[in-house]
Every structure is written in structure tokens, then in C-alpha cells.
Amino acid sequence: MSADTVELKDGAIRYRIRGDGPPLVLLSTLMGTWLRQVRVLSEHFTVITYDMRGFGDSPSATGFPSNAEHADDLAELLTAWGYDEAVVVGLSHGGLVAQHFADRHHDRLAGLALVATFAKAHDGTELFLRMLNGFLDRDDLPNFWEVLKSFLFSAANAELLDRREAALKAAMFDQYEVASLRSIYGQAMVHDSTAWLGAVTCPTLTIGGRYDMLFPPPMTEELAGLVPGSRTVMLPAAHIPPVEAPRAFNDVVVDFFGGTR
């Protein structure tokens, strides 16, 4: 699957498109996160993945954008790709950007899925985010990773994490520097979408990890409760359901959004 580039005013976006059904954007910081989704979901949708501007292979001329600016980038990308609207599936950081997209470009949403994300950090989540930001303030990436990896997989799959740690670290962490992580986690600390999620009118799916310590089930339920009519699904996973429980995740997305060639 070859990659192409869209030039933007303040940089460029490296992206991949596969399939020929209704457009579905899998939104995360780096498109490589979705390796276990693209082949399956492209049997039902036109699946679009990309590196956000300022990350991976998408350069930014203005440093790291705000999450609202990332949302505006997506609107510009949809226009460049020739789509009036699309289903947007946002994971973690991508889920925060997807919430901004729902606020700023609601008319471009055919559907919305918010995965392992939240409306506003509080309680244990706020504490964990402060801890992670503390490591970044000290430029301490090794300990940042040691804490972060404990959130990625559930206890049932801890052995799998041990076996795949080097590959996971290379795919999900080594492409970041302190500055890029500060942008992601600093914005997460102040994110608050509680004032606008009630205006979302498109079909919305909220997916959480049953064993996610970073964004635990009550936070997923709180997020879903803010969106009228949102369906909530808890998968047997920790913080990255698409990676830890890919078959169940893919089935839920296809069942809810019903793509077809």
C-alpha cells in the first residue's frame, strides 16, 4: 500500500488510502498504529490513515499544531481527497482531535468513534498524566516509557507485551522526541470537551478498554454520556484496544458503521 502526500499551507500530510467503500478515517498520531485494522476494514470501507502534521512523515512549518488545528487539517484533507464527509475513528490522542473535529466541522461527520479517550482529565487519569508530563519536563524518556508501557496491555496479555516490547517500542514510541510528546500530553492535561459534545448528532460509538488504567471504564462511560445516543462498547483490552483486541474491535466498527463495497 503506497503512501501519498497532500501539501497544506503550514506543512504536508503523508497518508494512505485502501478500499473503495464509504470513507472511514482511522485517526491517531501515527498511521502505523492501525496495521491490524486496514486490511480487514478496507473490505467494507475506503480506509484512510495518515501521520498528523508535525509527526512521523508529515512535516509542519509551524511546530506542533494544537488539537484544534489538527482537526482543521483533517477538514482540509477531506476536501483534498474529494469527500464531503467521512466516518472518523479517533484513538487516544486521535480521539481528542476527533472531538475537536466534531465541534469545528460537525457537517463533515458521517459517524464518529471515540476510542480509549476522554472528555476531561480528572482523578486517577489526571494524576497519571501529571506523572508522565513530569518525566517529559525532566527529559526522562526511559522512565516515561516504563510507566507508559504498563498501560498498554492488560494483565492477561502481559506476556505478549514482554515478547513484543521491542517491536511495540519501535512502532509506538521511538519515533517521538520529548518535544512531540510534550505537545500530546500537555494538551491532554487541559483538554475539556464537556461544553460541546452534547451537540454531536451523527451516529457515535464510544469504545473503551475494560482494563485500561489510564482512561478507565468510568471515564469511557462519562464520555459516552455526553454524546446523545452514543453506543458504548468495552473490549477485553487495556489502553490500545485496536492492537490488543483487533478482531473484536474490527467487528464492532463494521457492525456499527455498516460499510459496504
Image (cartoon, rainbow, N blue to C red):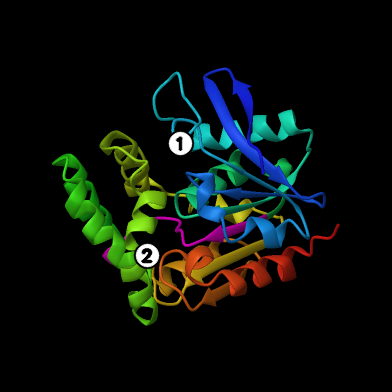
Categorize mark 2 by other alpha carbons within 10 Å: few (<14), some (14-19), many (20+).
few
The one of 171 and 145 positioned closer to us in this rendering: 171
On the image, the x and y values in percent for residue 138 come to 13, 41
Q: Is residue 130 visible?
A: no
Q: Residue extending furthest bottom?
A: 156
Q: Amino acid at mark 1?
A: Gly
Q: Which residues are magenta?
A: 112-124
Categorize mark 1 by other alpha carbons within 10 Å: few (<14), some (14-19), many (20+).
some
Element on which disc 1 rests: loop
Residue at image position (56%, 37%) is 71
On the image, the x and y values in percent for residue 164 come to 37, 65
Q: Amino acid at mark 2?
A: Arg
Count of numbered labels shown in the rendering = 2
**CB of mark 1 within 8 Å of CB of mark 2?**
no
- Mark closer to the chain start, 1 or 2: 1
Residue receiving disc 2 = 164
On the image, the x and y values in percent for residue 41 come to 70, 60
Vertical relation: 238 (above or below) 26: below
Q: Residue extending furthest right?
A: 261
Q: Is residue 26 visible?
A: yes
The one of 190 and 83 positioned closer to us in this rendering: 83
Residue 154 within the magenta-colored segment of the rendering: no
Residue at image position (70%, 43%) is 17
- Image mark for residue 56: 1
